[in-house]
Amino acid sequence: MAIPDFQTIMRPLLEHLADGAVRTNRETNEYLAGYFQLTEDELAEMLPSGYARLFDNRIGWAKTHLKGAGLIESPSRARYRITQRGLEALAQDAAPINMSYLRQFDEYTAFQSGSKPEKPAAATPVGSIETDTLTPSEHMEFGYQTVREELKEELITRIKAASPAFFERLVVELLVRLGYGGSRKDAGQTLGRSGDGGIDGVIKEDRLGLDVIYLQAKRWEGTVGRPEIQKFAGALQGQRAKKGVFLTTSSFSSEAIEYASLIDTRIVLIDGEKLVSLMIDTGVGVSTIATYEVKRLDSDYFEE
């Protein structure tokens, strides 16, 4: 089954604690994974940032909301138990335990005061997940992913509309930002000067120029197929080169990708999607308009 949202987790979590025993995070997470019959792949699914597992994050937020409403308590670090109010909530079999239910308690209203996130206007890009089922951290992460996807679309549109000379300069800038080519001047002198069929340029692999990488940088509208990669590989063999990078604004066919993975010559394929992602990550053609720091409680600081 799909990974449940944090509100769906609330009642099973309380049922796990119903015997009044103090449970660790690990015990609870293992119980709920079995309760929802999640697969290993589902349990391994990460948040977009990769800092935490999605299921663990949702359990954590379910605990945060239940604790804020006084249904559970934490007698020590990473340990929880049910309260009398939590037992009373379980006794109401017909009542769903979710945020609407928790709002009847003054403690929960105080908990939410001044910190409840607004729902984003656009839908999240993650399947059919509704925004009101997301945890606060998921709102931020999926919101960031939405902004990033929109920026990627803008970038690829502008690149395709630009001149070939501009695309050449963009490739130089990107490779320099990635640590290749030495200076922009040195990198620019090597690109576009080979003149050999299938090769658009050469760039240093490191600042000392101990090795070089051969480039093919083309703006394409259709899918780049295997014949184009074969042509590039043949040109590399003619130069006795072992490394090449093929950049395009479009995509590669599955046959092209398979071919590049099987030959002895190392050819890295960078399609339009990866190209604009690298531009965003290295700051090429984009500028930062805002930065947010997300912090978490340092439990060790409070240990006495």
Image (tube, helix red, strand yellow):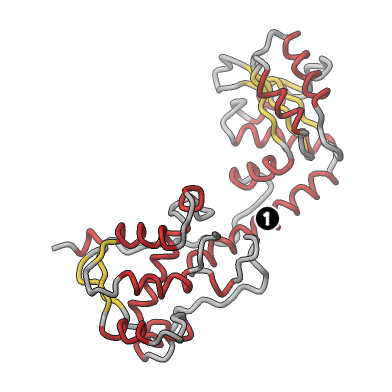
> What residue is drawn where x is 70% and y is 51%?
152
The percent coordinates of residue 256 (x first, y second) are: 76, 28
In the shown orientation, is residue 285 left or right of residue 113? Answer: right
The C terminus: image quadrant: bottom left
The image quarter in which residue 17 lies: bottom left
The percent coordinates of residue 58 (x first, y second) are: 45, 65
> What residue is drawn where x is 59% and y is 22%?
205
Q: Which residue is mark 1?
A: 149
Q: Nearer the viewer, residue 88 or 229?
A: 88
The image quarter in which residue 1 lies: bottom right
The percent coordinates of residue 110 (x first, y second) are: 37, 87
> What residue is drawn where x is 58% and y is 61%?
142
The image quarter in which residue 125 lies: bottom right
> What residue is drawn where x is 60% and y is 27%?
180
In the shown orientation, is residue 270 left or right of residue 19? Answer: right
Is residue 189 visible in the rendered image? The answer is no
